[in-house]
Image (cartoon, grey):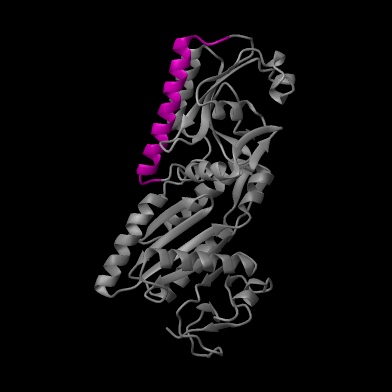
């Protein structure tokens, strides 16, 4: 079976690794930076094991993201820094008593150079389905070994990290932005849609995606990415009606559910949000200001479907169209609408729909104006 290799070491078969990553992403913890709920765990790990450094790390395809780091200033590291891969694969506490004399690690940058790590031990964080998501690790700068009691304590703390991740999925709020999380959205959208169907009323959905978010992280660092997520969360919290529901789906994806809102109202709200985001200034330091934009997709009941899956799918497809049309714009999902072939002067302004046969052309139109997008082949629908 084909396998994934890091630093010349077999990690996991591709299928198993894909399943592991799916489990990991289901906890929505990779993009949230340091989290205080894990700080007690690193403190206890350091105390129990008598080490100056303790880490809680989650491992994705290529990187280790640290949720807490005591005694060590690090937010992420390449997965090819193989301490973490070994700790994940062993299924029990993995221990390196003197890394400088271990051929597997003697050339590791943390061993051969600063901070000159000598001792490492890591206990795997194991999900209920058996997949290993990361490790609770301790580090020292002198050679040493753990006692049986210390190994047992490290395994216990790894289990506590898993318990915290489980609780985070059950909790309704995203810890970074304060918005509702995906789990709450699933229940809330189903509830509001059922209510709309029962009352024969409208329901709008706005999907937002921060443009070039990976570039922001790569250029300015993950602290800048976290700042962008927090700012967008605050903007959504402060710019919605009492009955609206703002959620962070994960990563740079957000969703706003608007009960009793017609398509034109939802589209107008989406355009206001887009403009407010474009005007944001993220001051990363006294000399550096970062700006962000969002691509937004709009869908509504009953025009775009009668199930949560339909509405989410159509809104996300509209985001895809917005990104393909040049980003920093709003696109309304095209499915199931009464299209017009021409633009009427008395048509409702600002409601843009790609004609059914022009999706591909819309995707390639990078010259469309910002705001609610009108690429070639779009038509205005009377409301």
> Considering only vertical position in the picture, is 334 above or below 313?
below
In terms of image quadrants, where is residue 320? bottom right
- Asked whether the viewer can see residue 243, the reply is no
- Asked whether the viewer can see residue 98, the reply is yes
Q: What percent of the width, then of the height, locates residue 91?
A: 50, 26
> Considering only vertical position in the picture, is 150 above or below 364?
above
Q: What percent of the width, then of the height, locates residue 25?
A: 50, 45
- Locate the C terminus and report the quarter of the image it occupies: bottom left
Q: Is residue 321 magenta?
A: no
Rendered residue at 63%/67% (across/down): 324
Q: What percent of the width, then of the height, locates residue 357?
A: 58, 81
Rendered residue at 69%/46% (across/down): 219
Q: Which residues are magenta?
A: 145-173
Q: Residue furthest left?
A: 198
Q: Is residue 172 magenta?
A: yes
> Considering only vertical position in the picture, is 178 above or below 322?
above
> Considering only vertical position in the picture, is 37 above or below 246?
above
Residue nearest the viewer, comparing 143 with 352? 143
């Amino acid at each position: 079976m084909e396998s994934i290799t890091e630093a010349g070491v077999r990690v996991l078969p591709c299928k198993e690794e894909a399943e592991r990553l799916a489990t990991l992403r289901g906890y929505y913890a990779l993009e949230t930076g340091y989290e205080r709920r894990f700080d007690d765990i690193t403190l206890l790990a350091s105390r129990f094991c008598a080490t100056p450094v303790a880490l809680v790390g989650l491992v994705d395809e290529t990187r280790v993201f640290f949720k807490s780091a005591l005694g060590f200033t690090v937010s992420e590291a390449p997965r090819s820094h193989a301490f973490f891969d070994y700790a994940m694969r062993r299924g029990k506490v993995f221990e390196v008593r003197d890394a400088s004399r271990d051929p597997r690690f003697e050339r590791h940058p943390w061993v051969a150079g600063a901070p000159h790590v000598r001792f490492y031990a890591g206990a795997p964080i194991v999900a209920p389905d058996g997949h290993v998501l990361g490790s609770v690790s301790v580090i020292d700068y002198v050679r040493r070994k753990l006692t049986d009691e210390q190994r047992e304590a490290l395994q216990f703390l790894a289990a506590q990290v898993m318990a915290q991740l489980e609780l985070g999925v059950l909790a309704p709020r995203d810890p970074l932005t304060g918005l509702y999380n995906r789990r709450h959205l699933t229940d809330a959208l189903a509830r509001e849609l059922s209510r709309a169907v029962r009352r024969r009323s409208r329901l709008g959905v706005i999907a937002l995606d921060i443009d070039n978010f990976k570039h922001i992280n790569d250029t300015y660092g993950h602290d800048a990415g976290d700042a962008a997520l927090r700012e967008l969360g605050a903007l959504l919290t402060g710019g919605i009606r009492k009955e609206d529901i703002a959620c962070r789906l994960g990563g740079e994806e957000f969703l706003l559910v608007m009960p009793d809102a017609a398509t034109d109202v939802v589209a107008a709200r989406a355009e206001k949000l887009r403009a407010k985001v474009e005007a944001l200034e993220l001051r990363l330091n006294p000399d550096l200001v970062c700006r962000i934009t969002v691509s937004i997709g709009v869908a509504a009941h009953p025009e775009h479907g009668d199930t949560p899956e339909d509405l989410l799918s159509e809104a996300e497809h509209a985001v895809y169209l917005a990104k393909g049309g040049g980003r920093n714009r709003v696109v309304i999902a095209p499915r199931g609408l009464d299209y017009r072939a021409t633009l009427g002067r008395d048509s409702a302004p600002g409601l843009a729909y790609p004609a059914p046969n022009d999706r591909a052309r819309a995707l390639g139109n990078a010259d469309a104006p910002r705001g609610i997008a009108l690429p070639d082949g779009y038509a205005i629908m009377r409301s």
